């Protein structure tokens, strides 16, 4: 049994108390997630009609024996229509957990959305009295816009948006594709699930169309298994699968991580072309600032589960405000860096996610901190119509200005 000899260890009694409290909270959240609810309980309105997604004060926690890991701790940002929003930050800052929360893929019962809103503007089929989609005279089906709060949706209702309205490109295509099914079978499944009245022939034609869109000759790949394709080809298949149901939002979670630089460039060009063709939005998650600079219209910088700066790509790269954002920029290798120059790194470590301080999380690593940084966590300050930063340095500027 562990004894609490100093502040770094928990006694057996404390561990049991934590486990009991966690079990009670997890049971409550699981019951809420699995409840039966009418549509009115999770219908809502967008704050700004020009957005496709609005994440508002989102809290996603993981309940462990040592305590509660606050992986996403009050995150707020928007994804406008027809835009690419890049989310950047070092590993463990909450980028992927935020995106998995949008898809409702957080693994329960230990992982739970505890609080906050995820408002998404969905395009739904209109239904007749029998609950069947209403066909249009010129083909297809009539649609209507509805705004769902994904965080409040029962898990049984998530099929309304997952895969069809919001699609995700995962960072490792080898583990995302099922090794026992052919590429064609896995692509066809998307159409068969989400298109009313789809037949195998319609699904195959759609799959072949999507493969051509991502630059693949269908005859060479449709009947192949994932292990028969290269990493770049598998990633293209993942993009084709994400596009098959014509989503309004694509979440690309580090889509080029496992690829060499030549294939990376091809995948990024492909994503940019596809965004224009489908008239949709992309939420691009990466730790690569070069990818963000090339692809994004807006940038969100995350640190230790919080958004610490957000703005247009020009504002973040040309006029970064937060000391962490400045540090990220300085730690990027450049063509002018010679062999005698040491690459800059941000000193110190991220605080323990179970025992987060009440002051600014970056304080211990910041070379620009003031006495005020030891006080409460800084609020988000607006420094331009589109540029926001959470730092006490700009609290002072705002008060003086």
Image (cartoon, rainbow, N blue to C red):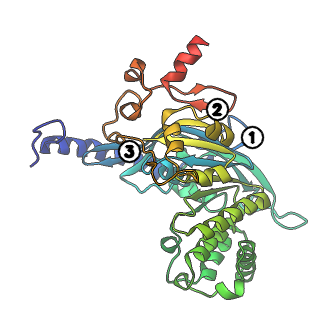
Nearer-N-terminus badge (1/3): 3
Question: How many residues crowd mark 1 within 10 Å: few (<14), some (14–19), many (20+)?
Answer: few
SS type, badge 1 = loop
The residues bearing labels 3 and 2 have C-alpha atoms spaced at a distance of 38 Å
The quadrant in which the C terminus is found is top right
Farthest residue in the front direction? 340
Residue 307 point in image, percent of width and height: 52, 38
Nearer-N-terminus badge (3/2): 3
Q: Residue drawn 64% across and 32% down?
A: 387
Residue 66 point in image, percent of width and height: 25, 45
Residue 355 point in image, percent of width and height: 30, 37
The residues bearing labels 1 and 3 have C-alpha atoms spaced at a distance of 35 Å
Nearer-N-terminus badge (1/2): 1
Task: Reply above or below: 358 against 203.
Answer: above
SS type, badge 2 = loop
Residue 332 point in image, percent of width and height: 52, 49
Residue 28: assigned label: 3
Residue 213 relative to residue 56: left or right: right
Farthest residue in the right direction? 138
The reply to whether dot 1 and dot 2 touch (C-beta < 8 Å) is: no
Question: How many residues crowd mark 2 within 10 Å: few (<14), some (14–19), many (20+)?
Answer: many
Residue 387: assigned label: 2
Q: In front: 309, or 133?
A: 309
SS type, badge 3 = helix
Q: In front: 184, or 109?
A: 184
In front: label 1 or label 2: 2
Residue under label 1: 50
Q: Residue drawn 57% across and 55% down?
A: 157
């Amino acid at each position: 049994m562990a004894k609490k000899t100093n502040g770094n260890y928990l006694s057996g009694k404390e561990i049991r108390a934590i486990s009991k409290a966690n079990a009670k909270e997890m049971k409550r959240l699981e019951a809420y997630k699995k409840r039966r609810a009418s549509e009115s309980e999770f219908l809502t309105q967008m704050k700004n009609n020009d957005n496709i997604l609005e994440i508002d004060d989102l809290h996603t926690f993981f309940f462990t024996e040592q305590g509660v890991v606050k992986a996403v701790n009050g995150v707020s940002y928007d994804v406008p229509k027809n835009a690419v929003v890049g989310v950047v930050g070092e590993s463990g800052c909450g980028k992927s957990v935020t995106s998995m929360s949008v898809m409702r893929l957080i693994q329960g019962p230990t992982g739970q959305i505890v609080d906050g809103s995820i408002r998404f503007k969905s395009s739904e089929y209109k239904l007749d009295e029998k609950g069947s989609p209403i066909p249009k005279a010129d083909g297809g089906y009539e649609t209507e816009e509805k705004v769902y709060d994904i965080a409040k949706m029962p898990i049984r209702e998530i099929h309304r948006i997952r895969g069809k309205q919001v699609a995700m490109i995962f960072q490792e295509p080898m583990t995302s594709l099922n090794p026992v099914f052919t590429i064609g079978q896995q692509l066809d499944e998307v159409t068969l699930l989400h298109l009313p009245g789809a037949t195998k022939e319609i699904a195959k034609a759609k799959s072949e169309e999507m493969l051509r869109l991502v630059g693949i000759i269908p005859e060479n790949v449709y009947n192949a298994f994932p292990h028969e394709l290269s990493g770049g080809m598998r990633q293209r298949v993942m993009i084709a699968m994400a596009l098959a149901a014509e989503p309004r939002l694509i979440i690309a979670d580090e889509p080029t991580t496992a690829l060499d630089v030549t294939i990376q460039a091809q995948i990024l060009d492909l994503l940019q072309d596809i965004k224009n063709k489908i008239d949709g939005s992309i939420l691009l998650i990466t730790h690569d600032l070069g990818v963000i600079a090339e692809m994004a219209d807006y940038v969100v910088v995350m640190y230790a589960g919080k958004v610490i700066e957000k703005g247009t790509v020009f504002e973040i790269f040309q006029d970064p405000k937060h000391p962490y954002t400045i540090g990220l920029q300085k730690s990027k290798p450049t063509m002018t860096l010679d062999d005698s120059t040491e690459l800059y790194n941000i000193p110190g470590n991220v605080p323990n996610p179970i025992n987060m301080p009440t002051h600014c999380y970056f304080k211990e690593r910041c070379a620009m901190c003031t006495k005020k940084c030891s006080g409460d966590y800084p609020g988000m300050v607006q420094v331009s119509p589109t540029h926001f930063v959470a730092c006490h340095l700009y609290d002072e500027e705002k008060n003086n200005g």
